[in-house]
Amino acid sequence: GENVEQHPSTLSVQEGDSAVIKCTYSDSASNYFPWYKQELGKRPQLIIDIRSNVGEKKDQRIAVTLNKTAKHFSLHITETQPEDSAVYFCAASISNSGYALNFGKGTSLLVTP
Amino acid sequence: DAGVIQSPRHEVTEMGQEVTLRCKPISGHDYLFWYRQTMMRGLELLIYFNNNVPIDDSGMPEDRFSAKMPNASFSTLKIQPSEPRDSAVYFCASRGSGRKDTQYFGPGTRLTVL
C-alpha cells in the first residue's frame, strides 16, 4: 500500500528552540495532510492540517509546509515549551478513499527546560 | 458534544476468548474509522465505514477480526478468537463528509490478551 515516512523518530530540543518534523508520501493523489499530537496515554488530537491547494499554513507557534512536487510536508514548532513534549504523527489522505488516512510512525518530541 | 465514545477503556482477556470493542461516533458524522496502535507498527487503519457501509477492510489483519456498523450511532470491532499479538490500543475515529471536516479520535480501548 501507499506509505508515509516520517523523520526523525525522536527529537530532543531545548525550551525556546525550534523543532522540525518531516514527512514524505508516495500517493501522488493525496490531497489532505493533517498533523496529530498524542500525549502519553491519550488520544491523537489534530493540531494543524493543510490541503493540496495551499503551500503553507500557520497557527501561532505551529506551521506546516507542503511541497506537492516533491511529495513532502513538514511541521515546524517555534519557541518550543515543555508542554509541547508528545508524539507527533503526520498523515496523508488515501486517494479514492473519501477521507481515510495513512499515518507516519510518529516522532517523539522532548522539550527540556 | 461528547465526542467519539469508546468502550470499554481497558480490556484484559485470555487467549482464545472473544473480544468486542464498541464505538459511538460524533452525531452527524458520516465516516467511522477503526485503527490499531502498537509500538512496532504505529497507527494502522483497519477498516472504515461511510453511511454505515464498510468501504475498505483491507487493513483487517485476519479473518479473526470483524467489524459492523448496524446504525449511524454504533459500531463494533470483534476479535474471535483473540491472540496475545492482538494486544494494542484500538482507536475509533469519525468525521463528517464536508471537505473541510476533520477526523476526531475516541479515547481508545487498551486491549491486553494474556
Image (cartoon, rainbow, N blue to C red):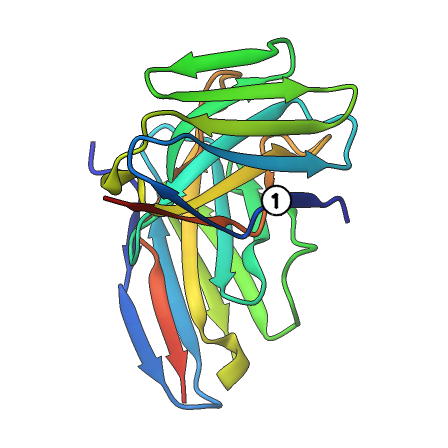
**Residue B39: x percent and y percent?**
50, 66
**Residue at image coords 57%, 42%:** B53
Q: Is residue B65 left or right of residue A37?
A: right
Q: Secondary structure at mark 1?
A: strand
**Residue at image coords 73%, 30%:** A96
Q: Chain of mark 1?
A: A
Whether residue B71 is visible here, answered yes or no, is no
**Would you name the residue on which mark 1 appears?**
A6
**Residue B86: x percent and y percent?**
51, 76
Which image quarter is the C terminus of chain B in?
Answer: bottom left
- For label 1, the crowd category at 10 Å Cα-Cα, with few meaning under 14, some 14 to 19 and many 20 or more, is many
Closer to the camera in the image, B20 or B36: B36
Say above or below: A62 vs B24. Answer: above
Say above or below: B71 vs B9. Answer: above
Q: Is residue B81 left or right of residue A15?
A: right
Which image quarter is the N terminus of chain B in?
Answer: top left
